[in-house]
Image (cartoon, grey):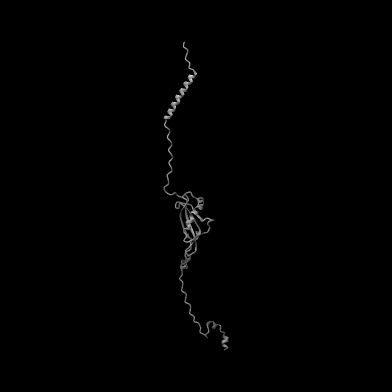
Amino acid sequence: MRSPHTVRPSRRLAFVSVFAWVWASASGAALAQTPPAPAPAPASPPAASTGPSPARPDCDATCVRAFNDRAAQACAPQIEAQAPIDFDWLHRPFGGIFQQGDTPDAEHPAIRYRGDSIRFQSPQKEWVRVSYECSYDPVRQKIVSVTVRLGRLDRPAAPPANAAAAAPGAQNGKPARAVRPRPAPRQTIAPRAGEASDIEFFQVNPRASGAR
């Protein structure tokens, strides 16, 4: 009988190596033919706002206090520009210029600050107390409007003096009474020399005159 053919270990190792190389090549080719996964599309940027940003609807009393100093720095020059001749701050630079503040709402979308810490010099060289109101947008951080008026916040300016003198009886809701004209003073005639005046007549002693 013919003895069975035996494979030597070296040939078996070479065969295994060739088989592994062929398998690796086939796997690499298959991977090369696989198309790569598409990259995710970039997120679209947020749409730009075309109009002005509205004021913060959540601006409460804390928000009003937080923007107080910033609004004062932006509003003070615009208040000063309203003075006809000169101005005089009563508390600056060591104090605030606002004493009141309102939170934004649907009708007024900005913070409304008010104060009366300034005086304006009138053309008559008189110093007049002035109150003011500044509307400040906390989103855009800018002044929306500035208004000033004569008088303090709790005491508006008094009416002119000539208006009160024109109708003195119209105060307290009472109608003015007609004023009667005063009679003209009597004309006195100076006494002549040697005549007794009224004062001399009443000072005459009746006993002395009867003894004559």
Total of numbered circles in the picture?
0
Q: Where does the image place residue 148, in percent across and percent down from the top left? A: 47, 58
Q: Is residue 75 above or below residue 167?
A: above
Q: Where does the image place residue 19, in percent across and percent down from the top left? A: 45, 23
Q: Where does the image place residue 171, in percent across and percent down from the top left? A: 48, 66
Residue 70 vs residue 163, the one in the foreground: 70
In the orientation shown, which residue stands out farthest toward the bottom? 212
Q: Where does the image place residue 156, in percent across and percent down from the top left? A: 48, 61
Q: Residue at x 43, y 29 (%)?
A: 32
Q: Is residue 53 above or below residue 130?
A: above
Q: Is residue 38 left or right of residue 207?
A: left
Quadrant of the rendering where the C terminus is positioned: bottom right
Q: Residue at x 46, y 24 (%)?
A: 21
Query: In the figure, residue 40 lies in which quadrant?
Result: top left
In the orientation shown, which residue stands out farthest toward the top? 1
Q: Residue at x 49, y 19 (%)?
A: 10
Residue 118 vs residue 212, the one in the foreground: 118
Q: Is residue 33 above or below residue 144?
A: above
